[in-house]
């Protein structure tokens, strides 16, 4: 018998048994599968929505997938973030690195790139330019509005998605055709509670992923006529489902997709070096552009000499300082857990990290 995933000559099973059920679906077919194989999907965020969308697309046979995230795996993620396991949380592996490792094991025919980074305009320019679809899997509107400005400026389709509690919502945005996210924020209440304040159940994640993943597949195989261009929202616990026609919400004066766009969220003054993470007692500190990368091994040794309780891997160093925990990445970025006070976070950073 042949090896699983290989044909009898030892070659890849792409285009034969592996995707046979997907190819039998008439709206994809063999031609759609070939198109999918030549496409690049970019996923911003490797949490619940990011891991779900990434797994769906990798199993479907997209040619290339880039997934980017700034955080690491914690125990509270395991309830709904389907690519991760206990060892990832125990070792505090960065989500993007853990996701890449698992996705490559799922389908060796896909070029998977996991990037550990806090994304700004420069990172989007480097990693997402030329992608065929962008998928929003973030947990905050600053990142979504940044992605929105970038996608509209680059004329790239993107799929918005969010979930909290038992509520989910999603929308496919086609620059030049549909309203953008900035348009909708004028009239549709999209913000509010977060998973860190009111929780989230796994089924609503899977439902949002189903809508986002279906939209991504339609775009990648070239069946844009099948796209649902309405804002979909639902509450799985109270059994509510709505679809809102947003076509008339496109604003001529929108700073992103209007007649005179300025793309405000791509401007340098919007790129903060500090941020209180959404719904968490955590401050992120980013080094200035061009800063020298950290030698993590040397940092771990220095902290141990000071008597700190240190946990380290090739991607980060984590240590406890009193009632706080600091996590330092190779690019010099740090997460200071246990505070929402930026000044206090900076003081701790300079005390221990220079």
Image: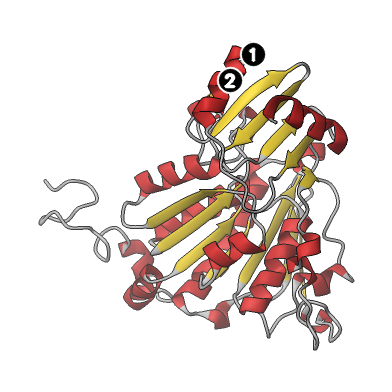
Q: Position of residue 133 (x, y in %)?
A: 55, 69
Most extreme residue toward the top is 307
Looking at the image, residue 201 sits to the left or right of residue 108; the answer is right
101 vs 185: above or below: above
Indicate whether 115 appears above or below 232. Answer: above
- Relative to 262, 33 lies left or right: left
For the question of whether residue 81 can be seen, the reply is yes
**Residue 169 seen in the current view:** no
Residue drawn at 62 percent across, 79 percent down: 155
Q: Nearer the viewer, residue 68 or 312?
A: 312
> Which residue is drawn at the image coordinates 27% and 66% (left, top)?
15
| Among the 4 quarters of the image, the one containing residue 329 | top right
Residue 33 marker: none
Asked whether the beta carbons under mark 1 and mark 2 sit within 8 Å of each other, the answer is yes
Q: Which residue is mark 1?
A: 306
Q: Within the image, what quadrant is residue 178 found in?
A: bottom right
Percent x, y for residue 111? 38, 57
Identity of the residue drawn at 64% across and 72% down:
151
Q: Classify 10 Å Cα crowding around label 2: few (below 14), some (14-19), many (20 and above).
A: some
- Element assignment for label 2: helix
Can you give x and y, in whole percent of width and height, for residue 58 in the image? 42, 56
The image shows a total of numbered marks equal to 2
| Numbered badge on residue 302 | 2
238 left or right, relative to 45: right
Q: Residue at x 76, y 74 (%)?
A: 263
Q: Secondary structure at mark 1?
A: loop
């Amino acid at each position: 018998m042949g090896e699983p995933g290989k044909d009898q000559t030892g070659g890849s099973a792409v285009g034969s048994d592996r995707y046979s059920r997907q190819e039998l679906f008439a709206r994809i077919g063999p031609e759609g599968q070939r198109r999918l194989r030549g496409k690049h999907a970019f996923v911003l965020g490797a949490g619940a929505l990011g891991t779900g969308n990434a797994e769906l697309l990798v199993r479907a046979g997209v040619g290339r997938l880039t997934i980017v995230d700034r955080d690491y795996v914690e125990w509270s993620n395991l309830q709904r973030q389907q690519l991760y396991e206990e060892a990832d949380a125990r070792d505090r592996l960065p989500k993007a690195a853990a996701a890449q490792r698992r996705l490559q094991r799922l389908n060796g025919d896909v070029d998977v790139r996991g990037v550990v980074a806090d994304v700004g305009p420069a990172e989007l320019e480097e990693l997402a330019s030329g992608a065929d679809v962008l998928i929003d899997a973030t947990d905050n509107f600053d990142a979504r509005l940044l992605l929105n400005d970038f996608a509209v400026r680059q004329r790239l389709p993107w799929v918005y998605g969010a979930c909290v509690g038992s509520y989910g919502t999603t929308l496919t945005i086609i620059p030049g055709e549909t309203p953008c996210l900035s348009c909708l924020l004028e009239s549709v209440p999209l913000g509010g509670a977060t998973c860190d304040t009111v929780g989230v159940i796994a089924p609503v994640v899977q439902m949002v992923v189903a809508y986002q993943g279906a939209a991504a597949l339609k775009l990648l195989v070239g069946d844009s006529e099948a796209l649902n261009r309405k804002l979909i929202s639902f509450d799985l616990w109270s059994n509510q489902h709505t679809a809102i026609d947003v076509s008339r919400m496109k604003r001529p004066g929108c700073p992103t997709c209007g007649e005179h766009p300025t793309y405000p969220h791509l401007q340098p003054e919007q790129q903060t070096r500090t941020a209180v993470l959404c719904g968490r007692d955590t401050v992120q500190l980013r080094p200035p552009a061009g800063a020298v990368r950290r030698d993590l091994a040397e940092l771990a040794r220095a902290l141990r000499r000071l008597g700190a309780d240190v946990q380290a891997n090739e991607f980060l160093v984590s240590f406890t300082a009193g009632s706080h925990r600091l996590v330092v990445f190779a690019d010099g970025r740090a997460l200071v857990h246990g505070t929402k006070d930026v000044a206090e976070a900076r003081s701790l950073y300079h005390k221990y990290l220079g």
